[in-house]
Amino acid sequence: MSVAYSRVKQIGEGSFGKVHLVSDRASGCKHVMKEINFTRISAKEYQEARQEVAVLSTLRHANIVAYRESFEERGVLFIVMQYCEGGDLFTKIERQQGLLFEEDVILDWFAQLCLAVKYIHDRRILHRDIKSQNVFLTRSGLVKLGDFGISRVLDGTHDFANTCIGTPYYLSPEICENKPYGYKSDVWSLGCVLYEMATLKHPFLANNIKTLLTKILRGTYPPIASVYSVETRDLLQDLFQRDPKNRPSPNAVLRRPFIFARCRKFI
Ligand code: ADP
Ligand code: MG
């Protein structure tokens, strides 16, 4: 590994390799380093890893994990980025042990996530893997979208990317039907994350993939607790519209007054 960093501890097991908390030897600052061993992956997977670097390095936004640098050494691609001390949202949700979050907290986090997604969509980038494991929290309560491993930059002639990937729980109806992944598929996943924050559970759950797909296509999910506002409930319903065209864009979500009120401190 580069002489510039020393490993502090392992914090994650990525799909292609390990994720370490590292310390910059010169400054002592902490960062996260993702290691991708490309001697053991296919050419396509290597391209995806390079894609993550290419995409991440162009993004600069308060709600997106900041990229620092990347380098290759002896068959390993290292990606160094900002460390989010609060860890990922999935772990945060698990730690609640069933205790629901305050609605203010949920909507504050969700507004930040929408700002991140609006920012990438404005740049014709699809994230394609929005899920609580890929949403990070800082010590100061900022939310950062990360893991651009399977993101795609659309070229303008096609407004869709046509590979079928992702985590089954977050699959949108169009992906279940083998239709292309579009901007509104990211919006569906935003709905899944909002639902998870409100219930600490996935909206669509099943023991097997066939039942899961049926539930997603039917679009029925257990209601969220009545302590939450009707605005949040309505928003979820809109994010879970079966027809992608009927789902609001991240920008339209941000313009809803109950969300906009929480963004002012970020814009
Ligand atoms: P993968 O492509 O393998 O899913 P991720 O970038 O999502 O890789 O990282 C895997 C895990 O490592 C995350 O779920 C999280 O627990 C941890 N992690 C990754 N990046 C960071 C970060 N910037 N700050 C804190 N934890 C992180
Ligand atoms: Mg991930």
Image (cartoon, rainbow, N blue to C red):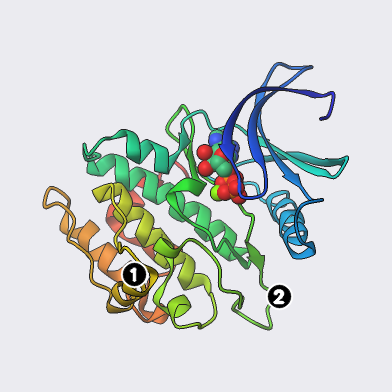
Quote the CA–CA distance across marks 2 and 1.
32 Å
Q: Quadrant of the N terminus?
A: top right
Q: Do the residues labelled 2 and 1 touch (CB within 8 Å)?
A: no
Q: Position of residue 72 (x, y in %)?
A: 85, 42
Q: In this view, does 153 lie to the left or right of 164?
A: right
Secondary structure found at label 2 = loop
The residue that disc 2 covers is 155
How many numbered marks are there?
A: 2
Which class describes the residues within 10 Å of circle 2: few (<14), some (14-19), or many (20+)?
Answer: few
The residue that disc 1 covers is 212
Picture quadrant where residue 78 is located: top right
Q: Is residue 21 above or below residue 81?
A: above
- Depth check: 20 or 120 in front? 20
Q: In this view, does 179 lie to the left or right of 71?
A: left
Q: Where is residue 203 in the image (x, y as percent from the top left)?
A: 29, 60
- Depth check: 121 or 161 in front? 161
Q: Position of residue 199 (x, y in %)?
A: 24, 50
Q: Residue at x 82, y 50 (%)?
A: 39
Which class describes the residues within 10 Å of circle 1: few (<14), some (14-19), or many (20+)?
Answer: some
Q: Is residue 203 above or below residue 196?
A: below
